[in-house]
Amino acid sequence: MRQKTSISRRSFLQRAALTAGAVAAAPSALAQTSANERINVGAIGIGGRGRYILGAFLQYPDVRMVAVCDAIGERRARAQETVNNHYGNQDCAAYIDPRELLARPDIDAVMIATGDNNHSLISVLAARAGKDIFCEKPLSVTIGESRAVADTVRRFARVFQCGTQRRNVSNFVFARELAVSGKLGNIHTVYAEKAWKQSGVHFEVLEPEPEPPREVMDWDVWLGAALWRPFNMKYTTGFWRRHGDFSGGSITEWGSHTVDLCQWALGADHTTPVRYEVTNEDGDVRATYADGRQLVITTGLRFGSCPVRYEGDEGWVETGDSGEIEANPPSLLEGRHFSGGYPSDNHVREFLNCVKTRQQPRSTAEAAHHSISTCHCANIAVRLGRTVEYDPVKEEFPGDDAANRLRTRAYREPWVL
């Protein structure tokens, strides 16, 4: 395996500054090339979801996957082998530290599919290094992190696509079209499913275990932005999905998709609700926008994982990953049928097209910031056990010190935004 050694943070930042300066000084070289030229891509984070997205990139002939990166050695080796077998050569480099991959000037774009904890950090570093970015959801663990991503992407004129791929899945697209067409009347309530019944996260610190060799598992890189704690392999399994240092639990796990779809259907990509009320002991949340429309984050909808429902004063529509869709009046469906599933192929293809044209895709950093901020506000209400009020312009909770402290988290050197 071609393994790369560490570079210093100063060296990385110097290279990133030079690359970013070149980006700011001249139009992207890709914007001046033909549509048939290849895009050099590096993949960062190649566990289960990352392997799938890696395959989505590899299928396109205008992509050249030149590097893979993961803190876990087995994943790194498997991904490198996959890429080399795909191209029939040994050209794919493998990295432990994402900063080393980002320092390569020949890489045009990166796919980021690490754990939720590091999505924002690596996206910001990638934008500073002049890379276009396809980043899996959820975009952040706190409101402040995704704001930093959106601001940095804009500052360095990067193309960014959040992995909320249902914006490019046909049944969800059709349901959204019904909502914005006026055929449901004025939309007054939208419903977003969360991943499991109970909301909330925990902050358990596990018993220390012997730390493996760096080639097997780089614990510092895996932790990334999170506060230091002794190694325990359990963190790296599904345990992290309910841990507040690494994730937002049930609400961000599916809400990063379903809340995002609801925001999209409401034309609210630029804002968030202003009031968040916890409605029951399961941590369901009713959020109210400035214009009175309501978003309900709950469980119990139908049609597979990540279902959504849009209700207007003249009708409603509900759909999910099963591809099933139901509407009232039924005539709205016009005999339409959808196959189901939630493939990322169209979403990746849209990103690649935008890398070449410099247009913006459907799931921009700004839109993803507002949808995940809505999830974070809901989580803050659950964590505090009370209603919270939010100012989506200032992005703060007016006069609420306890809630405002939860908008950000402490980072540790050298993993800082």
Image (spheres, rainbow, N blue to C red):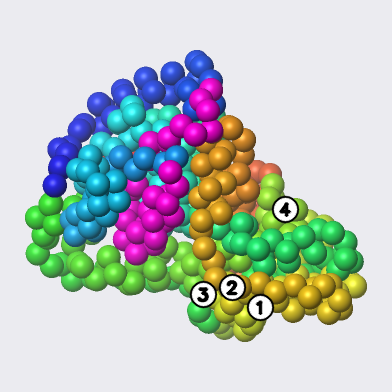
Magenta residues, as a range?
32-61
Number of labels in the image equals: 4
Q: Where residue 91 sits: x, y (%)?
A: 23, 39
Q: Is residue 34 magenta?
A: yes
Q: Amino acid at mark 4?
A: Ala
State yes or no: discs 1 and 3 in contact (Cβ < 8 Å).
no
The earlier-in-sequence mark between 3 and 2 is 3
Q: Residue 340 shows which numbered tag?
A: 2
Write down the residue under mark 4. 268
Tag in front: 1 or 3: 1
Q: Secondary structure at mark 2?
A: loop
The earlier-in-sequence mark between 1 and 3 is 3
Q: Where residue 108 sits: x, y (%)?
A: 41, 33
Please identify the quarter of the rendering in which residue 272 is found.
Answer: bottom right
Quadrant placement of the C terminus: top left
Q: Amino acid at mark 2?
A: Gly
Write down the residue under mark 1. 324
Q: Amino acid at mark 3?
A: Ala
Please identify the quarter of the rendering in which residue 2 is found.
Answer: top left
User: What residue lies at 52% left-to-right and 36% top-to-bottom?
Assistant: 355
Write down the residue under mark 3. 195
The earlier-in-sequence mark between 3 and 4 is 3
Rounded to the nearest angstrom, the CA distance separating label 3 from label 2 is 18 Å
User: What residue lies at 65% left-to-right and 43% top-to-bottom?
Assistant: 394
